[in-house]
Structures are given as C-alpha cells and as structure tokens.
Amino acid sequence: DGGITQSPKYLFRKEGQNVTLSCEQNLNHDAMYWYRQDPGQGLRLIYYSQIVNDFQKGDIAEGYSVSREKKESFPLTVTSAQKNPTAFYLCASSQGAGAGELFFGEGSRLTVL
Amino acid sequence: AQTVTQSQPEMSVQEAETVTLSCTYDTSESDYYLFWYKQPPSRQMILVIRQEAYKQQNATENRFSVNFQKAAKSFSLKISDSQLGDAAMYFCAYRSPYYAGGTSYGKLTFGQGTILTVHP
C-alpha cells in the first residue's frame, strides 16, 4: 500500500540531545513537509521540500534541520537549540506544489524529559 | 502572509443533525485552494473536502459540503446527518499556488482547529 511512514511513533529525549525523526513515502510525490502540532495551536510548518536536494524554511524552523537526499525520504532533526521540542510532529507529502492535497503520516510524539 | 482563523474552538451536535464549522482566511492572492481536514483521536489527518478558488460552485462530498464566499474570504463546512464517527478535530487549511520563480511553493497554512463532539 502506498503511503507515508513516520518513525518512531513515540520518542523520549533528554535535554541537550539531538534526535532525528524519520519520514518515508512511496507515493512518488515530489513535495514533502514537516509540521509541528501543539495543543490549541493547530499545525505549524517547520520545513518543506519541493524537489530532491532542495528545501525551504517554514514558519518555525529555528532549532530544526532537514535533508532531502532521496525523493522518498525527508528526515527531521530536532536539535538541542530547539527550546521547547515536546510536541506532535507530522510529515506530509504532495504530488507537487499545485492543487493537490497533502497526504499525512501518522505522526511522531516527541517528549523531552 | 496568509492566515486562517477558526473562531469556534469547540462545537457539538446531536446525532443525525446538521452542524456548520466556520473558517475565514486572509490573503492577497486570487488563485488558491482551500481544504478541510479531519483529525480523529488516532491523530491521522484525513482530507474531508477541497475547493479551488477559481470555481464558483461549492464542493460537496456525500454528507459534507462547503459554503465558499470568496469576496468575504469565508469557507465554512457543513456536516449533514451527523454520525458518531464524525467526532474529531477539524482543521481548515489554505494552500498557496505555486508560481515558477516565486516563493509561495504551495505552502499549506492551517487554522487552529475546531473540536466537534457528536452526542448520541
């Protein structure tokens, strides 16, 4: 089945540690996105990528980094510079930057201890 | 920058009744796309319905329909014959079009969400 796979579903991190969230898609989509979801604040865009080897900062990129070395993969690293990393993270993809909707993974819950 | 506002943090409806969720947005673009997504307790985001701004006809998907008022920048979702499975968080979202050489890049901007409770 085609879809988006995020891992791990749950992740605990100590303060000062970097962690990487995985996002893989087999939909052959060009564009991929990372969103952060906090209670009462909806989804906010962290980074997005329209093509391989290219990505752009979203609205809340500070303390995060990404790479797009392969079309199907868009990992997100939450660095120690992120002041409040505890959140639910959603990865999404779309056919392109046109009219198509975004397809979402099941999300990853990161908790900083 | 585009903004999306959902002014109803919570709504409730009786099973089999109709409920309308509100959404307004702010943009200077003339061509764009609007979506309603549903997020049940599993937290999986599910597309409910989409609307292209250039289309005057309101989109409909079974029990779900929208009232798209472009001049007023309003995009409400109507759920008819509400079912228990409709209980979820609903997000309104705006997608910028992509223009070659521009910076819009088809970003999707979300509202804050509306929690819908369905009473049996």
Image (cartoon, coloured by chain):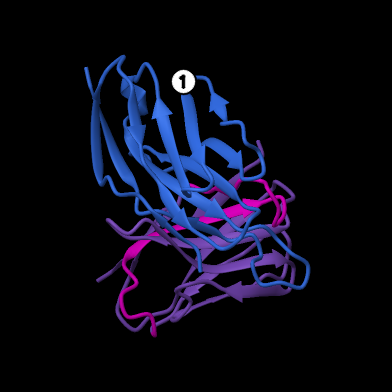
Horizontal side of residue B61 vs A94, given as left or right: left
The range drawn in magenta is A81-106
Mark 1, other Cα within 10 Å: few <14 / some 14–19 / many ≥20: few
Residue at 51 percent across and 38 percent down: it is B68
Q: Colour of chain B?
A: blue
Residue holding disc 1: B63
Q: Nearer the viewer, residue A89 or B64?
A: B64
Instruction: Say if the magenta span includes residue B39.
Output: no
Supply the letter of whichever chain is purple. A
Residue that protrudes farthest toward the front in the picture: B71
Residue A90 forms part of the magenta stretch: yes
Q: Position of residue B105 (x, y in %)?
A: 66, 65
Q: Nearer the viewer, residue A56 or B44?
A: A56
Residue at figure coordinates x 61%, y 60% from the top left: B29
The answer to whether B4 is drawn above or below residue A47 in the figure is above
Q: Nearer the viewer, residue A76 or B66?
A: B66
